[in-house]
Amino acid sequence: MQTPVETRYTTMNYTIEKASSDDYAAILNVMEPWNMHHVPSAEMGELDLSCFFVARLSGHVAGAAGYKLLSPDQGKTMLLGIRPEFSGMRIGRSLQNTMLDSMYNAGIKMVLTNADRPATILWYKKHYGYRQIGTLKKICDFGLSDVDHWVTLEMNLERYMLSKNEL
């Protein structure tokens, strides 16, 4: 089990830790403002909490992120969300970094991500070196209701981790 990572942001402290079965409802609550709480659904199957992390702030789940192993060397991020009131605290970045570390430690070399928000797509590209490799039609209302497709992004996790370690 991963040791919680304590991160400090101005006067607010939060920890990133493995999700437990007790966190399921809180994870869906975090995803609700982003319309990513319809789980299970045609867009999102049941969550495997063994591959999920939560950000705790004052004992409450402020953010959550998870992934899925697709093959021995390929993973896919499943959900990443932060309660709107905690935006700007770098919680999303901490969750993403923790997910990537966990996938890398599991032997993953390539990571897929689907996103529909232009700002999120730019964030993935700018901070993590993702590149767009296609689009995928949405099956049901999930994420942005007025966008009918996902942008599929891919990152070379091995290259990203090596470049991160060189800094």
Image: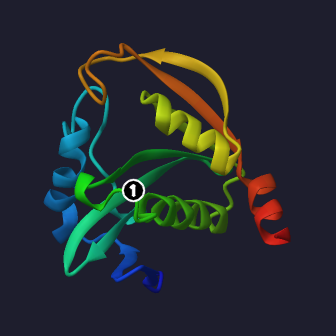
Judge from the rendering whether residue 83 lies leftward or rightward of residue 90; answer left or right.
left
Compared to 57, does 160 lie above or below? above
User: Label 1, on which residue?
Assistant: 65
Compared to 81, does 105 lie above or below? below
Quadrant of the rendering where the C terminus is positioned: bottom right
Residue 21 visible in image: no
Give 16 or 9, whichever is nearer the viewer: 9
Give 70 or 13, whichever is nearer the viewer: 13
Compared to 118, does 2 lie above or below? below
Picture residue at 53% right of the left edge, 38% below the top: 113
Picture residue at 67% right of the left edge, 39% below the top: 130
| Residue 160 place in picture, x, y as percent | 75, 55
The kind of secondary structure element at disc 1 is strand
| Residue 10 place in picture, x, y as percent | 41, 79
Residue 79 visible in image: yes
Quadrant of the rendering where the N terminus is positioned: bottom left
| Residue 8 place in picture, x, y as percent | 44, 82
Give 59 or 109, whichever is nearer the viewer: 59
